[in-house]
Image (tube, rainbow, N blue to C red):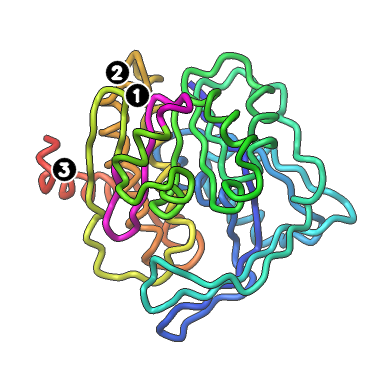
């Protein structure tokens, strides 16, 4: 059962409250998602970069042996998406210093023919019309989940509402859920979002974990109590990567029949939580590149005991 992520590959500059910073590191939703998902099995990415994309970043992606980059387009004469941000003392909030869209202002990449039969598709954050166009290129996926952000809620709401009628799940943060629905209570907001079509909504609350609002029930998970928080960039994307990769793996093994079921999604969130807890311990993909299955399983077992999942 194949897993595909569509989104961005970028070059980030990040400043943290303790005075640390990194310039020109590998970032973007596809990079973080794929790195996390690769811990569970194969993942195929669809994204575009310019000819200024550093060789060292290509090498970093190649170190994750389960990431298939055949869908990564390199465009001659174009510039790679770049983002710079500064985290505030409360690291759930950050200030964007600059955004250079580069290839994101151009036509989105095409989904390779070999990817179109994918069982699981994650539409990482981009314009909802682009996400819908991407989704239309797949044949009959068993699971489709989308991410979004406040910008699209503000400027492309009609497109976003249309997209929600075509996906099984939506992942967004607490502030975005409130902005979309006008409800501060995340459960109320989640239930409102279900009215647009998804089977489930996952509302991320940063250090306070996440809430699952599903047609068949509710669940809440805390964040893993990580001692070292260096850089939260990409935590949401890696959370989604762990979640989706677990579901794709369970489908492949025949352990689940319906990847949208309440129990399957609830369990997948624990895997997303664990992967995200590693991501925030360093900058970029540094921590994820050093992971092995034993480390992930040990942290998951600890979390499962805390949550009585076993």
Q: Residue at x 41, y 61 (%)?
A: 287
The residue that label 1 is drawn on is 250
Residue 237, how many percent across, how many down? 47, 49
Q: Callout 2 environment at 10 Å: few (<14), some (14 to 19), or many (20+)?
A: few
**Mark 1 or mark 2, earlier in chain:** 1
Q: Is residue 238 magenta?
A: no
Q: Quadrant of the C terminus?
A: top left
Q: Report which quarter residue 18 is drawn in.
A: bottom left
Toward the viewer: 235 or 194?
A: 194
Q: Which residues lie in the magenta part? A: 194-211
Compared to 124, does 161 lie above or below? above
Tag 1–tag 2 contact (CB < 8 Å): yes
Indicate the secondary structure of the residue bearing disc 2.
loop
The residue that label 3 is drawn on is 304
Compared to 257, does 296 lie above or below? below
Q: Residue at x 27, y 42 (%)?
A: 270
Toward the viewer: 80 or 212?
A: 212
The residue that label 2 is drawn on is 255
> Is residue 98 in sight in this rendering?
yes
Q: Is residue 209 magenta?
A: yes
Res 59 label: none
**Mark 2 or mark 3, earlier in chain:** 2
Indicate the secondary structure of the residue bearing disc 3.
helix
Q: CA distance from mark 1 to mark 2?
A: 5 Å
């Amino acid at each position: 059962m194949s897993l595909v992520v569509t989104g961005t590959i970028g070059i980030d500059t990040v400043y943290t409250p303790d005075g640390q910073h990194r310039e020109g590191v590998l970032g973007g939703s596809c990079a973080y998602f794929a790195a996390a998902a690769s811990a569970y099995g194969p993942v195929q990415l669809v994204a575009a970069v310019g000819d200024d994309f550093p060789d060292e970043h290509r090498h970093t992606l190649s170190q994750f042996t389960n990431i298939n980059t055949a869908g990564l387009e390199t465009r001659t004469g174009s510039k790679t998406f770049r983002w710079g941000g500064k985290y505030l003392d409360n690291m759930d909030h950050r200030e964007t210093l600059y955004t250079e869209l580069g290839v994101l202002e151009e036509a989105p990449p095409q989904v390779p023919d070999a990817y179109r039969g994918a069982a699981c598709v994650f539409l990482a954050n981009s314009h909802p019309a682009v996400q819908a166009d991407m989704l239309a290129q797949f044949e009959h996926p068993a699971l489709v989940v989308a991410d979004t952000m406040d910008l699209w809620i503000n400027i492309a709401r009609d497109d976003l509402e249309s997209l929600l009628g075509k996906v099984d799940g939506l992942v967004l943060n607490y502030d975005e859920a409130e902005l979309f629905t006008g409800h501060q209570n995340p459960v109320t907001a989640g239930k409102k979002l279900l009215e647009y079509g998804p089977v489930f909504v996952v509302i991320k609350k940063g250090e306070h974990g996440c809430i699952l609002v599903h047609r068949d029930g509710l669940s809440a998970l805390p964040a893993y109590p990580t001692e070292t928080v260096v850089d939260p960039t990409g935590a949401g994307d890696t959370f989604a990567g762990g979640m989706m990769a677990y579901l794709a793996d369970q489908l492949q093994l025949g352990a689940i029949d319906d990847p949208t079921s309440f129990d399957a999604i609830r369990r997948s969130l624990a895997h997303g939580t664990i992967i995200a807890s590693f991501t925030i311990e360093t900058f970029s993909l540094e921590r994820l590149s050093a992971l092995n299955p034993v480390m992930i399983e040990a942290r998951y077992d600890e979390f499962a005991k805390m949550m009585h999942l076993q």
